[in-house]
Amino acid sequence: MKRVPDKKWRDSMAYAPRFFLSMAIALVAFAVVTYLSTGSLATTALQTFLCAVLIQIGYFLTTLFLVWRAARERRQGIGPGTPDADKTRDAAKSKVPVSMNEPGHSKP
């Protein structure tokens, strides 16, 4: 079984804690502006709820897209950890023959 390479999930555009904090800030700002423009708590609550639902739908679709893209790259063998990437990395290594089982292995 192939090991999945480690990723920095915090760099992903769909990192959940960052998303939820950003969403909360956007909803508070939306609610304040809506209340100041309408003056109605009921209208503000309804419109803020609808805005939250639309944001969640967008987050869900973004997450689906990221999963689809990662699966497509894995199928095509594009990502790190694939045999082609390992060959490239091995070719970049130093070509110094060293055997730890032979006497004098530390000699240049």
Image (cartoon, rainbow, N blue to C red):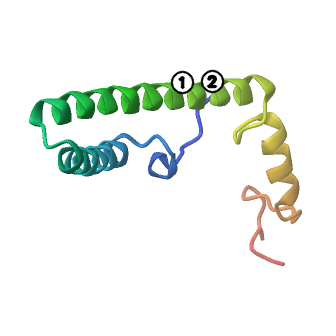
Q: Position of residue 63 (x, y in %)?
A: 50, 29
Q: Which residue is drawn at 33% across and 33% down?
A: 51
- Residue 39 to residue 50: above or below: below
Q: Residue at x 50, y 45 (%)?
A: 13
- Residue 13 to residue 68: above or below: below
Q: Nearer the viewer, residue 65 or 27?
A: 27
Residue at image mark 2: 68
- Residue 10 to residue 67: above or below: below
Q: In which quarter of the image is the C terminus?
A: bottom right
State the CA–CA distance, disc 1 to disc 2: 6 Å
Q: Which residue is drawn at 78% across and 36% down?
A: 78
Residue 77 vs residue 2: left or right? right
Residue 27 vs residue 87: left or right? left
The answer to whether the residues at label 1 and label 2 have Cβ atoms under 8 Å apart is yes
Task: Residue type at mark 1: give it.
Answer: Leu
Task: Residue type at mark 2: give it.
Answer: Trp
Q: Position of residue 26 (x, y in %)?
A: 31, 48
Q: Which of 37 and 7 is in front in this view?
A: 37
- Residue 13 to residue 96: above or below: above
Q: In which quarter of the image is the N terminus?
A: top right
